Image (tube, rainbow, N blue to C red):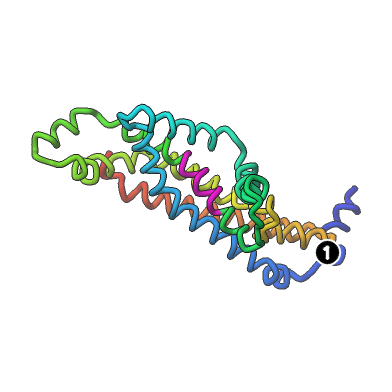
Amino acid sequence: MTFGLHYILTATSLPLNVILERMSDGMIETVKIFVITLVLSMPLALLVAFGRMSRFLILRWIVNAYISIMRGTPLMLQVIAIYFGPYFLFGISISSEYKFTAIIIAFVVNYAAYFAEIYRSGIESMPRGQYEAAHLLGYSKVKTFTKIIWPQVFKRILPSVTNEVICLVKDTSLAFSVSYIEMFSLAKQLASSTASFTPLLVAGVFYYIFNAVVAWIMNLLEKKYSYYQ
């Protein structure tokens, strides 16, 4: 058993610098998926949260159904459905260039649903008296939210947001479900072609470091907003 493991790790193994060079494009694609998803999903989530808290019953039903579907089905299934959906539903031919677009759409609408629930819980946890006091001081609803409510909400929800952001780093690997070449896909291909476990170890280290950097940045944000405690 020990000999077999040693063979897997060393047989036809490439030098580490060559592995890193070959996997560099996949690392870049992983970071792109992460950054674009985060930039688009977080503001979209705020709109979804407002819809979830709307006084209009039909709007609340629609938003609730959207959140339920996004949170109740696997992200991998959503990626596959959005990529192949145009062809199977409408007979529209799909190109390889559409893969990245489909991945971003799936990731954004999925994570917007999760972030929206985090936002909603934070907003609804604020004492009603703060809204009333702001109204007496002549603040508009928009100014009340942006100047008084949101800074406090942001501080409260940061730990939950951090957890979701860390999950997003790992979920980027699900892009392989539509054969998109990112970090995890390249690692599997290299591991298979070289009969070596090293590319997978490199991928694991990459994800770990990526998550450590994300956690460090979010921790800095928590410290920055600690004066709201």
On screen, residue 11 versus residue 19, left or right, reads right
Please tell me whether residue 100 is drawn above or below residue 107 in the rendered image: below
Residue span colored magenta: 104-113
Residue 64: which quarter of the image?
A: top left
Residue 13: which quarter of the image?
A: bottom right
Q: Residue furthest left?
A: 137
Tell me the kind of residue under disc 1: Thr
On screen, residue 56 versus residue 109, left or right, reads left
How far from the left and from the top, in percent, is residue 73?
Answer: 60, 35
Please tell me whether residue 183 is drawn above or below residue 142 in the rendered image: below
Residue at 44%, 43% (x, y): give it. 161
Q: Quadrant of the C terminus?
A: top left
**Classed neighbour count for the residue bearing mark 1: other residues with Cα under 10 Å, few (<14), some (14–19), many (≥20):** some
How far from the left and from the top, in percent, is residue 46?
Answer: 37, 43
The residue singled out by tag 1 in the image is 194
Residue at 68%, 66% (x, y): give it. 23
